[in-house]
Image (cartoon, grey):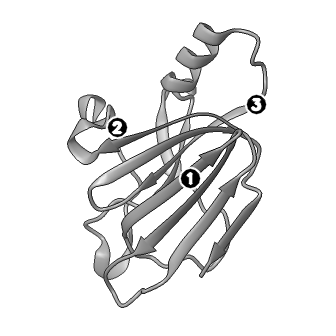
Amino acid sequence: MDEMVERYERWVPIPGLPEAPLETFGCTFNDGWLSVTARYWSTGAHHKLHIDFDYVEAFKSYEEFSDPWMSNQLPLPQLTGEDHRWRYPLQEVIHSSWVARVMSRNGGIDRAWRHLVISTTDHSLHIMTSGPPRNVELI
């Protein structure tokens, strides 16, 4: 397998996250900081997940059938257990073509960028950030 091929992996920012899909998310952006709150759905997991990102270069939101993933159909990490038909809601895109395009277009942004995805049952939020989130908590 070519090591530089784009691929999606589970992103587990904290231990103890429910093995359940996310139903909705909301976000706010201010001066490079992005805050996201998402609500879990199904299997009795009624938690919300809150994530604060320190520095975000770019982010984009798609309705499920508009997501560029639909055109390449790369394998997505799946949930296990009762909700095994759903994709795992937090993903990291390794060797992201989106990050490569942004870096090529913008030039001079030579940080170690990450492409993270927060997926609900019908939307996806793609985030280009440097470093780990500032804060992650179940609320």
What distance separates the C-alpha of mark 1 from that of mark 2? 29 Å
Q: Position of residue 137 (x, y in %)?
A: 66, 74
Image quadrant where one finds the C terminus = bottom right
- Identify the residue position indicated by label 1 in the image: 28
What distance separates the C-alpha of mark 1 from that of mark 3? 23 Å
Kind of residue indicated by mark 1: Thr
From this view, report whether residue 134 is shown above or below residue 4.
Answer: below
Q: Earlier in the sequence, mark 1 or mark 3?
A: 1
Kind of residue indicated by mark 2: Leu
Pointer 1 local density, CA inside 10 Å: few below 14, some 14–19, many at least 20: few
- The residue shown at (34%, 37%) is 74
When asked about the image quadrant of residue 121, the answer is: bottom left
Q: Position of residue 118 (x, y in %)?
A: 47, 54
- Identify the residue position indicated by label 2 in the image: 74
Pointer 2 local density, CA inside 10 Å: few below 14, some 14–19, many at least 20: few
54 left or right of 125 in image: right
Q: Earlier in the sequence, mark 3 or mark 2?
A: 2
Looking at the rendered structure, which numbered label has been put on residue 112? 3
